[in-house]
Image (cartoon, rainbow, N blue to C red):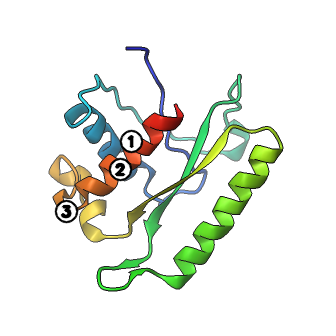
């Protein structure tokens, strides 16, 4: 198996990068049976941004999606996701290998507590498995 790097990146703090990374690593190790190494890298200053070469394949998804069990995604969340999809499509036209992933991670306390309890919230396992499968398709 060829080693693959998957990075969860956002230059704003408090957006759930560590939680999503932890849950995806659990999915990779437990359900996909991939040898997995997880580490955290904190960039404290914007001038320390990493500019990878060659330009990587980029997958964009919605984290902390506003969601209600009985009605689905919030209207504002859907509008934001539509705008993100449009930006990804424009970036593809400019030659970037960027993909909008339809998968999202709901904004739920159980997801946020995942790291503290050593896994992921069981009721959201399918969300993370589906996100991981979408990531596998593009890398």
Of the pair 16 and 56, the residue shown nearer to us:
56
Q: Nearer the viewer, mark 1 or mark 3?
A: 1
- Describe the element under mark 2 as helix, strand or loop: helix
Disc 1 or 3, which lies upstream in sequence?
A: 3
Find disc 3 in the rendering and name its residue: 123
Q: Residue at x 68, y 68 (%)?
A: 83
Mark 2 closeness class: few <14, some 14–19, many ≥20 residues within 10 Å:
some
Q: Nearer the viewer, mark 2 or mark 3?
A: 2
Contact? badges 2 and 3 (CB < 8 Å): no
Please identify the residue farthest to the right as the structure is shown: 94
Mark 3 closeness class: few <14, some 14–19, many ≥20 residues within 10 Å:
few
Find disc 2 in the rendering and name its residue: 130
Describe residue 11's horizontal placement relative to residue 36 as left or right: right
Q: Could you say which quadrant of the image residue 32 lies in?
A: top left
Where the N terminus falls, by quadrant?
Answer: top left
Describe residue 91's horizontal placement relative to residue 110 as left or right: right
Disc 2 or 3, which lies upstream in sequence?
A: 3
Q: Position of residue 121 (x, y in %)?
A: 21, 58
């Amino acid at each position: 198996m060829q080693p693959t790097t998957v990075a969860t990146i956002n230059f704003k703090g408090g957006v759930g990068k560590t939680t999503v990374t932890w849950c995806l690593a659990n999915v990779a190790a437990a359900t996909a049976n991939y040898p997995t190494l997880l580490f955290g890298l904190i960039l404290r200053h914007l001038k320390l941004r990493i500019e990878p070469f060659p330009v990587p394949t980029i997958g964009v998804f919605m984290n902390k999606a506003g969601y209600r069990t009985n009605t689905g995604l919030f209207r504002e969340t859907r509008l934001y996701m539509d705008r993100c999809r449009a930006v990804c499509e424009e970036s593809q036209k400019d030659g970037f290998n960027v993909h909008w992933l339809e998968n999202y991670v709901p904004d739920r306390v159980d997801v946020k507590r995942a790291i503290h309890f050593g896994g992921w919230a069981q009721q959201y396992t399918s969300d993370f498995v589906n996100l991981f499968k979408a990531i596998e398709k593009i890398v």
